Image (cartoon, rainbow, N blue to C red):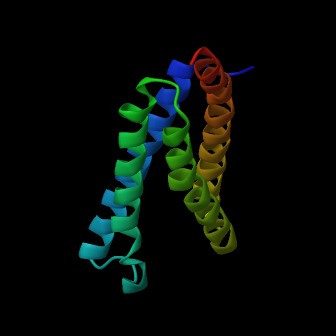
Amino acid sequence: MLLSFKTARRVFLLIGFVFVLSGLTVTALNVAQVIPAQYDWQGPLFLVLGATGLGAASWGLREARVWPVAVLTVAYVPWTVLGLIGDARQGYWPLVAGEATGLALIAWALVSTIPAILDARRVK
């Protein structure tokens, strides 16, 4: 069962919001010196990825186009997979569960956009 294009867009927006919240959280923890300095780069990266995803989903996916889906794939998939692997190695199972759910939602939304994009391309 595929999501509607509108629902897939909402999933991408939600994932972008989660990335932004993660970036704010990690940045705040770094400023408070609660986590090691080796993670300083992660907060800004999550903020940039979240903002990129939010922009691609909110402006780019107003219509069924290929480029926003490509941007969303690059912004979300590799970093979610890396986070999943890193957190699994450290035994952070609640984070692993959340990232696995997020990855499944991203994949579902990506697959769900394909029919709308193909239909839009056929019309042109």
Q: Is residue 67 depicted above or below 27 in this figure?
A: above
Asked which quadrant contains residue 96, the reply is: bottom right
Where's residue 77, x and y in %? 60, 53
Q: Residue furthest right?
A: 1
- Residue 67 locus on image (x, y percent): 51, 41
The residue sitting at 33% across, 66% down in the picture is: 44
Q: Quadrant of the N terminus?
A: top right
**Total numbered badges shown on the rendered structure:** 0
Residue plotted at (35% across, 78% down): 40
Front position in the image: 63 or 111: 63
Residue closer to the observer: 57 or 60: 60
Residue extending farthest left: 31
Q: Residue at x 49, y 28 (%)?
A: 9
Q: For the view shown, which residue lies furthest in the top direction?
A: 123
x, y percentage for residue 99? 60, 52
Looking at this view, name the residue that lies furthest to the front: 124
Res 106 quadrant in image: top right
Query: Would residue 115 be found to the left or right of residue 39 on screen?
Result: right
User: Picture quarter containing residue 31?
Assistant: bottom left
- Look at 41% across and 34% down and name the residue there: 60
x, y percent for residue 120: 58, 20
Q: Quadrant of the C terminus?
A: top right
